[in-house]
């Protein structure tokens, strides 16, 4: 079965702290996507990770992919309130990106 | 910027009604997708289309059909709406290949 698991499902953190969201998936893939969803809004693409060892960074967010471990991480550095959102990872198991399998999402709440 | 437009932000329908959800994209993308989003379940693919008049079932196609008569427009049809189809419906599009998805703002459908 093709599964994508994220943890934690909910994360409350203080401004200025660091934390990591984990995305595990069940079978071989070499492409993984991270999306962000603000409350009441649609999904916005953050990162596309294309191969083993890929690392992408934008601002306080850094994503990495380890295809051997079937694991991607989204690391948050010195969180700010504006990062409060739900974060989804999605895995391309087909090799064509025609059927992405999404994780359940991690709701991040950054408190002052 | 890519724009994916869903015709309704909120819809309330009665059980047994036929429901049409419309999606239009303005970037000449070959591929279009319909997902539903439910709390704790993430996004699940209902149907997708890789060309005009072409469609493929996603992971949860039961109770749904789709239509793609023009490249820019992809419609989701609930033939006879049921209460378990109450959900947020998200349309997305992308170019060919393994590029990222662009999402619409979603339609929150309530079936009473």
Image: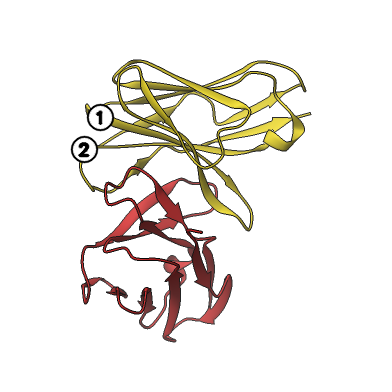
Residues marked 1 and 2 touching at CB (< 8 Å): yes
Which residue sits furthest front? A1
Q: Residue B26's x, y, as percent?
A: 27, 26
Q: Chain of mark 1?
A: B
Q: Residue at x 43, y 81 (%)?
A: A20
Residues at marks 1 and 2 on the same chain: yes
Which hue belongs to chain B?
yellow
Mark 2 packing: few (<14 Cα in 10 Å), some, or many (20+)? some
Q: Which mark is residue A93?
A: none
Up the image or down, B43 lies above or below B2; here it is below
Rendering quarter of residue B41: bottom right
Question: From the viewer's perspective, is A18 left or right of A107?
Answer: left
Q: Secondary structure at mark 2?
A: loop
Say which residue appears at 22% left-offset and 37% top-offset.
B95
The circle drawn on residue B30 is: 1
Tag 1's secondary structure?
loop
Looking at this view, is A66 or B70 the one in front? A66
Tell me the chain of label 2: B
Residue in view at x 48 percent, y 55 percent: A38
Please provide percent x and percent y for residue B19. Answer: 62, 19
Residue B96's tag is 2
Q: Position of residue A40 (x, y in %)?
A: 54, 47
Instruction: Tell me: residue B76, above or below residue A76.
Output: above
Q: Is residue B1 above or below residue A1?
A: above
Q: Percent from the top left, x then y, of residue A62?
A: 29, 75
Calculate the distance from the C-alpha at mark 1 to the C-alpha at mark 2: 6 Å
Q: Nearer the viewer, residue A52 or B99?
A: A52
Q: Nearer the viewer, residue B107 or A102?
A: A102
């Amino acid at each position: 079965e093709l599964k994508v698991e994220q943890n934690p499902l909910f994360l409350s953190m203080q401004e200025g702290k660091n934390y990591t969201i984990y995305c595990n998936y069940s079978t071989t893939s070499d492409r993984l996507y991270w999306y962000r969803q603000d409350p009441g809004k649609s999904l916005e693409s953050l990162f596309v990770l294309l191969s083993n060892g890929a690392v992408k960074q934008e601002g306080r967010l850094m994503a990495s992919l380890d295809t051997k471990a079937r694991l991607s991480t989204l690391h948050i550095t010195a969180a700010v309130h504006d990062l409060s959102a739900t974060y989804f990872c999605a895995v391309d198991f087909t090799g064509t990106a025609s059927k992405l399998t999404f994780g359940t999402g991690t709701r991040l709440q950054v408190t002052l | 910027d890519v724009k994916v437009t869903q015709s309704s932000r909120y819809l309330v329908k009665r059980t047994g009604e036929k429901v049409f959800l419309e999606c239009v994209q303005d970037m000449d993308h070959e591929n279009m997708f319909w997902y539903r989003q439910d709390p704790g379940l993430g996004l699940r693919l209902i149907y997708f289309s890789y060309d005009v008049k072409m469609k493929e079932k996603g992971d949860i196609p039961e109770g749904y059909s789709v239509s793609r008569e023009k490249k820019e427009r992809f419609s989701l049809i609930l033939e006879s709406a049921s209460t378990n189809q109450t959900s947020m419906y998200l349309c997305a599009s992308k170019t060919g290949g393994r590029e990222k998805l662009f999402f619409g703002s979603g339609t929150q459908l309530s079936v009473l």
